[in-house]
Amino acid sequence: MKAKLGTRILVAINIIAALGMVGIAGKLFLLPMAGKYLYKERYKELVFQCDDVMRGHFIAKNKVMTSPSEESIQGLRAAEVSLLSCHDYDKLRKKLQRFGLTESELASLGLEAIEEKAKDVRHFVETHEIRY
């Protein structure tokens, strides 16, 4: 009787340990893979969009500092409003971190986005650039 009880307890402990290992594997491997699969393209879009908006804001701010005018101030205000799009990027970044993606993985996705879009932009500029 006691041997059966001991065997059942050991089986229960083994089942709990196995479930724990599956949970840990899911948290460390499956969850980050799922997050990357689900949100990779959207994250890349937002990285490029936020980078572009920040560049526009920097240019508008410098324009106000070098040649202040009503037009340049309005441009700066518009650029400041457009910075709100960086909020979506930040929210998605935090969500992906909760999924378990590391800073390194997120940085890598950001570089991918900028490289991909830079190629598109270069092609667009080359196509539409006026050559003398």
Image: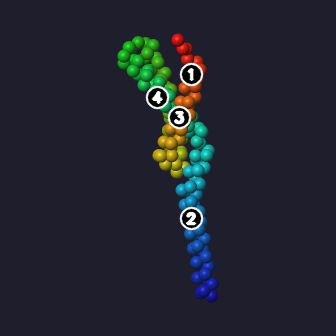
Is label 2 in contact with label 4 (beta carbons under 8 Å)?
no
Relative placement, left or right, of 4 versus 60 is: right
Q: CA–CA distance between discs 1 and 3? A: 16 Å
- Residue 22 placement (x, y as % from top left): 59, 63
- Residue 80 placement (x, y as % from top left): 46, 25
Question: Does the rendering let one see residue 97?
Answer: no
Q: CA–CA distance between discs 2 and 4? A: 44 Å
Position above or below: 20 against 62: below
Quick one: SS at disc 4? helix
Q: CA–CA distance between discs 2 and 1? A: 54 Å
Q: CA–CA distance between discs 3 and 2? A: 38 Å
Position above or below: 38 against 12: above
Q: Which mark is residue 66?
A: none
Q: Amino acid at mark 3?
A: Glu
The answer to which of marks 2 and 4 sits earlier in the sequence is 2
**In the image shown, does 126 or 116 lie closer to the viewer?**
126
- Residue 116 placement (x, y as % from top left): 56, 34
Q: Amino acid at mark 4?
A: Met
Question: Circle 4 sits on which residue?
Answer: 54
Q: CA–CA distance between discs 3 and 4? A: 17 Å
Residue 59, picture quadrant:
top left
Question: Circle 3 sits on which residue?
Answer: 115
Question: Circle 1 sits on which residue?
Answer: 126
Question: How many other residues sit within 10 Å of disc 2, few (<14), some (14-19) or many (≥20)?
Answer: few
The answer to which of marks 3 and 4 sits earlier in the sequence is 4
